């Protein structure tokens, strides 16, 4: 119908605009993602070329897999108790159904248009990351950015970190292809690397490592340089072993004198408006934060130790930094925090790594009782809370969240068949990317496969859109110039 007024190419132009909304919105705007869904569906309906849509989707088994996976959610309503929650979950995951249809029903974007989409994505990441850094360094107090992970202003810091990894993959791919604007892609790639390691987002670091390691493996395999390939694998194994050894070591600092807590309390209350018996800005006891900070600086837990602290030290302690080394920033600060959590934290609440371990234990306890069919689409939240109570979990009520592991989530939701299908279509996708020599698609598949281990990515609009969009885009062989 629109062709009569706007010419024969109008639906292709609208489709490109929809893809642009998706690839920009997945970085920074739920509104743009929602607009992309609405316009994408309307464009399909107004074009009305349903036979072509059907043919393209039928010839794309990767998209069919994800549509079947959405079907599992519908099927799971039949053995669920909380139907309202189940229907709401179905509504939230509508993007998982519609985005693959919108992307897959149209023809593959031309190389020129695909290149533009890549540029839009990289530019959006550069702009939003720059805004994040400026806000954190110059407006942190005004915006109440207490932790560096609060620096992500446009959505979940975890999802944003993963997008950084994908952005790096696109930059390196463009450089590998000898594209124009090499200096721009080099600068963007370096910026993404620096931002990732500075932001301390573990998911982002893992995504970047997968991109660098995966590309190296891909190139060495293509060029049949197996000696270098084996050497790289050995370096990776040694590095991983060293990291595990580092994390296995307790964070202990020598205490140079006998603690005098009464003195320390009085001295602290003289120097800070934050009472010794209160909580710091990260909701940790000030007393324990102060003691750990003093110990990390080799100072006594007494009057002299507190008096030796600088005004900047006092601010760090009030903010919640419990170790002076954490204030240096970068990934080393995050690793130090993980070491402390693993060896010293008695209660998992407030400690992200320990919380996840508790989530996984809780989810697995449910799976042991419902391994065949799961609890159904609507009973996941109820089952998790019931099991927390049954196990007398040490987590505080507000920290008793879902599994934060997509494999466990879908195992306890749909049972063994749902879990195996979820794993199968991801592995099938990665194998297909390898056959097509589609490097960015291959890396995206690896990132999704690994990060699903510690994230419920498909439980948020940004996560669903990110996965569904890139999965659907790379479900067919594309080319770019």
Image (spheres, helix red, strand yellow):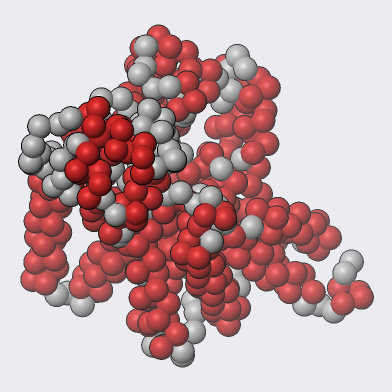
Number of marks: 0
Q: Which residue corresponds to the image point at 19% horizontal and 36% vertical from the top-left?
A: 302
Q: Which residue corresponds to the image point at 52% horizontal and 54% vertical from the top-left?
A: 141
Q: Which residue corresponds to the image point at 49% horizontal and 84% vertical from the top-left?
A: 481
Where's residue 152, x and y in %?
A: 50, 56
Where's residue 160, x and y in %?
A: 47, 56
Q: Nearer the viewer, residue 29 or 368?
A: 29
Relative horizontal placement of residue 397, taking residue 5 as reference (left or right): left
Where's residue 10, x and y in %?
A: 79, 74
Where's residue 293, x and y in %?
A: 24, 44
Q: Nearer the viewer, residue 369 or 191?
A: 191
Give the image quarter of residue 320: top left
The answer to whether residue 481 is seen in the rendering is yes
Give the image quarter of residue 347: top left
Q: Residue furthest right?
A: 5
Give the image quarter of residue 173: bottom left
Above or below — where is 217 with respect to 460?
below
Q: Residue furthest top?
A: 390
Relative horizontal placement of residue 251, taking residue 81 as reference (left or right): left
Q: Nearer the viewer, residue 333 or 163?
A: 333
The answer to whether residue 114 is seen in the rendering is no
Above or below — where is 134 with respect to 241?
below
Q: Nearer the viewer, residue 90 or 187?
A: 187
Q: Which residue corresponds to the image point at 8% horizontal and 71% vertical from the top-left?
A: 227
Q: Quadrant of the N terminus?
A: bottom right
């Amino acid at each position: 119908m629109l062709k009569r007024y706007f010419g024969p190419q109008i639906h292709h132009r609208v489709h490109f605009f929809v893809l642009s909304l998706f690839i920009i919105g997945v970085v920074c705007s739920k509104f743009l993602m929602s607009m992309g869904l609405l316009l994408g569906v309307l464009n399909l309906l107004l074009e009305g070329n349903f036979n072509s849509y059907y043919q393209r989707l039928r010839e794309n088994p990767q998209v069919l897999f994800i549509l079947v996976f959405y079907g599992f959610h519908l099927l799971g309503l039949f053995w669920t108790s909380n139907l309202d929650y189940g229907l709401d979950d179905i509504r939230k995951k509508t993007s998982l159904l519609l985005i693959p249809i919108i992307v897959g029903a149209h023809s593959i974007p031309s190389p020129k248009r695909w290149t533009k989409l890549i540029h839009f994505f990289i530019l959006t990441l550069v702009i939003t990351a720059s805004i994040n850094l400026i806000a954190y360094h110059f407006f942190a107090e005004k915006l109440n950015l207490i932790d560096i992970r609060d620096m992500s202003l446009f959505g979940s810091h975890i999802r944003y970190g993963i997008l950084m990894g994908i952005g790096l993959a696109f930059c390196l791919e463009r450089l590998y292809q000898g594209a124009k604007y090499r200096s721009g892609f080099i600068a963007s790639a370096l910026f993404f690397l620096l931002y990732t390691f500075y932001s301390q987002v573990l998911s982002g670091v893992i995504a970047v490592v997968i991109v660098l390691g995966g590309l190296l493996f891909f190139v060495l395999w293509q060029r049949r340089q197996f000696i270098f390939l084996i050497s790289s694998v050995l370096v990776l194994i040694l590095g991983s072993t060293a990291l595990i050894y580092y994390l296995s070591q307790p964070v202990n600092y020598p205490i140079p004198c006998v603690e005098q807590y009464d003195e320390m309390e009085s001295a602290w209350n003289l120097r800070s408006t934050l009472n010794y018996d209160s909580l710091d800005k990260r909701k940790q006891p000030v007393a324990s934060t102060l003691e750990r900070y003093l110990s990390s600086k080799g100072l006594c837990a007494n009057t002299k130790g507190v008096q030796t602290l600088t005004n900047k030290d006092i601010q760090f302690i009030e903010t919640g930094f419990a170790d002076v080394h954490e204030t240096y920033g970068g990934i080393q600060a995050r690793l130090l925090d993980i070491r402390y959590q693993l060896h010293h934290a008695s209660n998992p609440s407030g400690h992200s790594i320990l919380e996840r371990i508790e989530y996984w234990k809780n989810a697995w306890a449910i799976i042991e009782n419902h391994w065949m069919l799961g609890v159904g689409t609507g009973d996941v939240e109820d089952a998790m809370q019931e099991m927390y109570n049954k196990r007398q979990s040490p987590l505080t009520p507000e920290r008793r969240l879902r599994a934060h592991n997509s494999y466990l989530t879908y195992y306890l939701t749909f049972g063994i068949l749902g879990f195996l299908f979820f794993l199968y279509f991801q592995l099938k996708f990665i194998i297909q990317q390898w056959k097509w020599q589609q490097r960015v698609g291959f890396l995206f598949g690896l990132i999704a496969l690994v990060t699903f281990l510690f994230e419920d990515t498909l439980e948020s609009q940004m996560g669903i859109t990110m996965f569904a969009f890139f999965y659907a885009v790379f479900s067919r062989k594309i080319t770019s110039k």
